[in-house]
Image: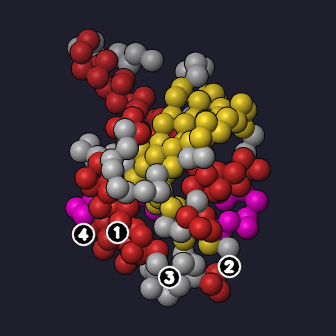
Amino acid sequence: MSSEKKFHTVCFSTNYATFSSISVMKQYFMTADCLDTNYLKDNHVEFKHKILFRNGTEMLVHNSYYEISSFSKVSQACSKAECFIIFFDLEYNESLIELNKILKYLKEADDNDKKIFLINIYTSENNIKSNLTEESVKNCFSNYSLSNYEMSTVNMDSSDELSKAIDKLTEVTIQEKLDAMNGKDMDNSKSGCLIM
């Protein structure tokens, strides 16, 4: 598993003014050891980063993060994405309204029910809005019949919470892709061997 793997994702934010996906990724770059960071457009960044898997294997991953901020048309990037990331601003009153717009867009854009990683972000616990509860977020997902999602919470002032959350979702997505490939190989060969 030493060869380079590719990871493509599409990102959204519930508050583009304060926490656009690309600005969040810029903060990630300050704490993560990334190589060859390349801003292809204002809304697209690629970089390489080593991920340490739970089994102790280290893998170089070529990452491609594409930000969508307009929901007027479905982007081709959605079909290439292996998962979706939503940065959910816990300090922004309109986050639930924006989340609904994003989920509606994803429901229309993705027919494969790809995993959605919702990362709750905040800078001060005192500023977290009382209506932005885990239950209210789950209700939004339920309203769109979306069940393939995972939530985490990150203090943006922490030195490593963001990098840990991003690295974890990258690892989970790549591991699921590898498991699916190995399962297909095993099913096709009928030998019971896992092919890496």
**Does residue 193 lie above or below 118 as drawn?**
above
Q: In which quarter of the image is residue 47?
A: top right
Q: Distance between the residues labelled 4 and 1?
A: 9 Å
In the picture of the structure, the residue carrying the numbered disc 2 is 124
Please tell me the numbered disc located at residue 143: 4
Image location (x, y in percent) of residue 28: 68, 51
The quarter of the image holding the C terminus is top left
> Alpha-carbon distance for marks 2 and 1?
24 Å
Which residue does the image show at 39% across and 35% down from the upper left?
80
Q: Position of residue 129 (x, y in %)?
A: 53, 85
Q: Is residue 113 left or right of residue 119?
A: left
Q: Which residue is drawn at 46% across and 46% down?
A: 10
Dot 1 amino acid type = Asn
Residue linked to disc 1: 100
User: N-terminal of the two: label 3 or label 4?
Assistant: 3
Q: Determine the CA span between mark 1 and mark 3.
A: 13 Å
Side of 26 where 103 appears, left or right: left
Residue 160 magenta-highlighted: yes
Res 109 visible: yes
**Span highlighted in magenta in the image:** 144-161
1 and 3 marks in contact (CB < 8 Å): no
